[in-house]
Amino acid sequence: MGVRSGVVVCVTSFLLGSLFTHWIADSLTLWKSPVTDEHLWTAASYYSILAKGPPEILYFLTAIVLIGGITILWSLRDGEAGNIMFDGGSIFLFGTSIVMYLYSVLPSLGAKFTSLPTHQLLDPFPRTLRHATLELASNNLICSVALTGVLALQAGRFWAESSDNDEDEYEEVEVDGVKSRAKTPDLRSEKPPAYQRINDTS
């Protein structure tokens, strides 16, 4: 169980880190106001570099995504309530990020940013590219939030399982009609009286 959770957390963290590298461009279009033509050209140039990148990078990311998705689905096979709740939410958020990338981000990169017109940073930015550039930044932000939600759900699952283990260590006992909770004794560590007497005499 711990290995599967570790794989999901590592894969999600890797993908989240990959999205954070887009901050070079996304910060110029999402978090700086007003958005100038210079900001848009800088962001578009960055996306153009991504669109022209070697396909091996995409294959590697696809393999990482498959590992993460299969691991979460594998956890659902256990049928435990915690798995269904936490891993079910994780697979929804994880799947949302993948679907958004497949049907919005990658097609936009391939169609709009493989070749940019010759320009200077202060030249007017084309209207046809403006919407695509802003949309890419928004999609990257949505995917980042969704993957952060996956990490939060996995942390919640770990906390819930830790609480259940702590509850199992205590049992309810009744002394003089008063019920209380006491820690379950570890019988393996208890020594028989005969063994204790022998040690006391020696």
Image (cartoon, rainbow, N blue to C red):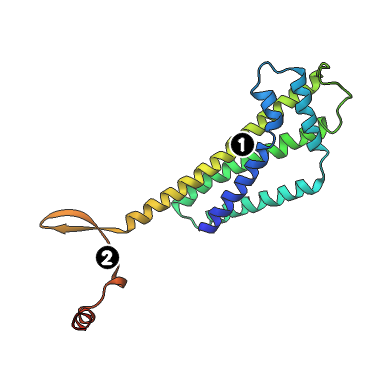
Identify the secondary structure beneath mark 2.
loop
Mark 1 — residue? Answer: 144
Q: Residue at x 46, y 45 (%)?
A: 156
Q: Residue at x 81, y 35 (%)?
A: 49
Amino acid of disc 2: Pro
Q: Can the viewer see residue 78?
A: yes
Query: Which sits in the foreground, 66 or 24?
Result: 24
On screen, residue 149 above or below 78: above
Separation (CA) of disc 1 from disc 2:
46 Å
Query: Which sits in the foreground, 89 or 194?
Result: 194
Mark 2 — residue? Answer: 185
Please provide percent x and percent y for residue 182. Answer: 23, 57
Horizontal side of 23 relative to 186 (left or right) equals right
Identify the secondary structure beneath mark 1.
helix
Please provide percent x and percent y for residue 20. Answer: 65, 37
The local crowd at label 1, few if under 14, some if 14 to 19, many if 20 or more residues have their Cα within 10 Å, is many
Amino acid of disc 1: Ser
